[in-house]
Image (spheres, rainbow, N blue to C red):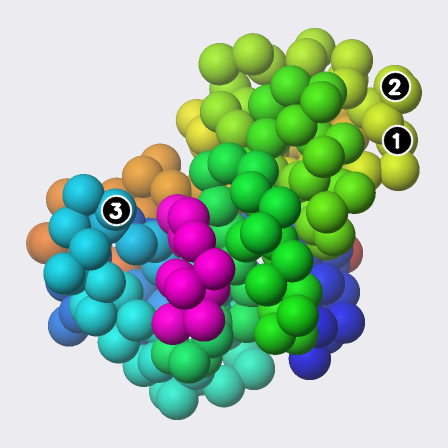
Amino acid sequence: MREKVIQRILESRIIAIVRGAEEKLILPLGEALLAGGISMMEITLNQAKPDGFGAAFRGINVIREHFGDRLLAGAGTVLSSAQVEMARDAGALYIVSPNTNPAVIRRTRDLGLVSLPGALSPGECVAAQEAGADFVKLFPASDLGTSYLKALKAPLSHIRFLAVGGINEKNAADFIKAGAVGLGIGGNLVNRDWMAAGDWGKVTELARQLVEAAGRNA
């Protein structure tokens, strides 16, 4: 399954990032994303409320059970090996973090999951890759822009970068052209107002625009 997830990331190029969504909205959100061509959903943990991790894990489990391989679920903002294990038990296929923690990366790989740690400096990016990261999440990407990604890619062309943080339909293509193999997109796509109002058509249309901008291969 690891190779299938890696291939999906390389082909679809976009991971939708879901933060704090009501559980009842997860399935219609998944349908809206799929209708727009996005087939990966990361559900994040709220580290300020660890007692509330259950909602995120239930969301991951619902996605796995309802959509199967059509929509691949992952866990985001994972900061410890214990959280990796809980995410795996919930059905997460990939683990995303805002930082580089070699212990988290190693545990992710030990459990047969795909590792996407966050990094910013060249040193962090290399440390993540050497610890076993499958992809390195450049975060926050938009704050430094495409020129920074290009500069990183020059000496670190062996690292597969995902651009995350401030990515939208206007700059998505630029980050792909700069060398990102994929993009993580949160609030610009998973718009809370649209979700609360049931405006799923808006989510689908924006998903289509992002897929086109990213030049999806499949």
Residue at 21% from the left image edge and 70% from the top image edge: 54
Q: How far, Cα to Cα, is label 1 from label 3?
A: 33 Å
Q: Which residue is mark 2?
A: 154
Marker count (numbered): 3
Assign a secondary structure to mark 3.
loop
Front-most of residues 131 and 60? 131
Viewed as shown, does residue 10 lie left or right of 186? right
The vertical placement of 86 against 194, above or below, is below
- Which kind of residue does numbered mark 3 sit on? Gln
Magenta segment range? Answer: 76-86
To which quarter of the image does residue 144 belong? top right
Residue at the spot x=81%, y=38% of the render?
159
Residue 179 visible in the snapshot: yes
Q: Of label 1 and label 3, which has the lower sequence position? A: 3
Residue identifier under label 1: 157
Residue 103 position, x and y percent, is: 58, 52
